[in-house]
Amino acid sequence: MKRSFLFSPLAVGALLTTASIAGAVTHVCPNPATKQARPIPMGVSIGVSDQYHTHCGSGTAGIVVSNVHGEQSILSNNHVGADDYAPYITVYLPDGSPYTINPYSPGAVWSQPGPAYLNCNNTTATTDGVANYTLAVPVVGGQLNLNEVDAAIALVQNQKVSPTILSIGTPSNQIVTSPSLYMNVQGQGASTCWAEYQITDLDYSHDEVGAQGKQYFFDHQINARGVYNPATGNTPYPQSGDSGTVFGTTGSCFGAVGVLWARDLNNTAIMSYMWSTMAKLGQTQVVGQLCSPTEVATSSLTLAEAKGNSGVPEYTLPDSMVLKPAPDDQLPFPSSLPPSAGFNEKVKAVTDLRAALEGIPHFWYVTFGHKQQGLNDHSIVVMVDKVTPQIMDRVPPSYEGFDVKIRVYKGGFPGLFPPADMFPDAAKPVYIDPK
């Protein structure tokens, strides 16, 4: 395959420099429907130009990566630019013919702006294309399938893409493999724009229930909560369109940590590790500057900026937290992780209890319980839209060794980014003990 470069690799070290303090980049928030001047930065909307695809595939262009051959690609989510989720879904076109909506075929054009922001039919591969889909890590549903990432890449088109991330700058060519608990991270999403989050769990297990009711199980995730911004009076949370956002260190040298792909039921962010994402996609470099990742030395970059600080002291992350390129300039990724302790047992309990309760009126599905929701990690939750005598009679207080709770919401299958009103108690979930 012909190599595709954003710019001459020889120019990277000469063009980019490292600042000593954070806070030098202005936060911007463009309309995600706006067509960006080429080459486009990262952190803007992106999607697939496909008039028949019901999902429409819009999300965020996360970061630029490359493989051992020097081919440079945009990294985003599988569900944004590939839809390689199994089992696949068949729909019917207006003429009655069947159409399998996933996956996309390699070569499908990723366009900017993302077509979902333009009613799914106003972008064209000719005028708006910036990259061509090449590879995704399949996401497979069912009890026996362990997923770790939701990721896809698209080979950049000549002179169409820049590695600079809006509101952040050019990332480091090093990545953070071992972030610390309660470490803050920043990212630029197409919908939320710039936001800061605090990591609350480094080995989070998550299950995702799609619009068709299919359930997918993920291990080894990062969970993070939004950091309150006194300047806006808001606490950010991931929104539809932010999928694919890459979060990283808050200092002037941005070291990628994780890739956002979903929101949990309590409005926290679910991210896959950057190192695992790149390894599974066969990508060995972040296209960026030669600097060591830094983190602000205050409790929050958001708070410091709200106070009017133009520069915030920062520190360089220790080598134990960072993965640096080897002498051949490739990142030497660690081995894949085995399933977390008890993960397979928890998946089995969720799957079995859902099957046992299927068909009961007002029951929807069963999901994982977490300490972030005020529960213990050895619990599962039965989701219902109404508590009835039959539900209280059929739902056990414990199941296959796991504590069981009941949560009431508006009903339906939430998908990756559930509507804001689907879980009115998202800020403080309310759980009911079965009898």
Image (cartoon, rainbow, N blue to C red):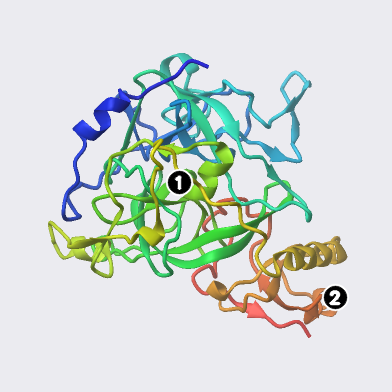
Q: Residues within 10 Å of mark 2 (few under 14, many from 20)?
A: some
What amino acid is found at the position of numbered circle 1 in the picture? Asp
Quarter holding residue 374: bottom right
What amino acid is found at the position of numbered circle 2 in the picture? Arg
Q: Residue at x 49, y 49 (%)?
A: 275
Discs 1/2, front: 1
Q: Residue 345 appears at what percent x and percent y?
A: 76, 68
- Give the CA distance from mark 1 to mark 2: 38 Å
SS at badge 1: loop
Q: Residues within 10 Å of mark 1 (few under 14, many from 20)?
A: many
Q: Residue 127 appears at what percent x and percent y?
A: 42, 16
Q: Residue at x 26, y 55 (%)?
A: 251
Q: Nearer the viewer, residue 140 or 318?
A: 318
Q: Quadrant of the C terminus?
A: bottom right
Q: Residue 224 appears at what percent x and percent y?
A: 46, 63
Residue position for label 2:
394
Residue position for label 1:
242
Quarter holding residue 296: bottom left
Q: Residue at x 13, y 61 (%)?
A: 308
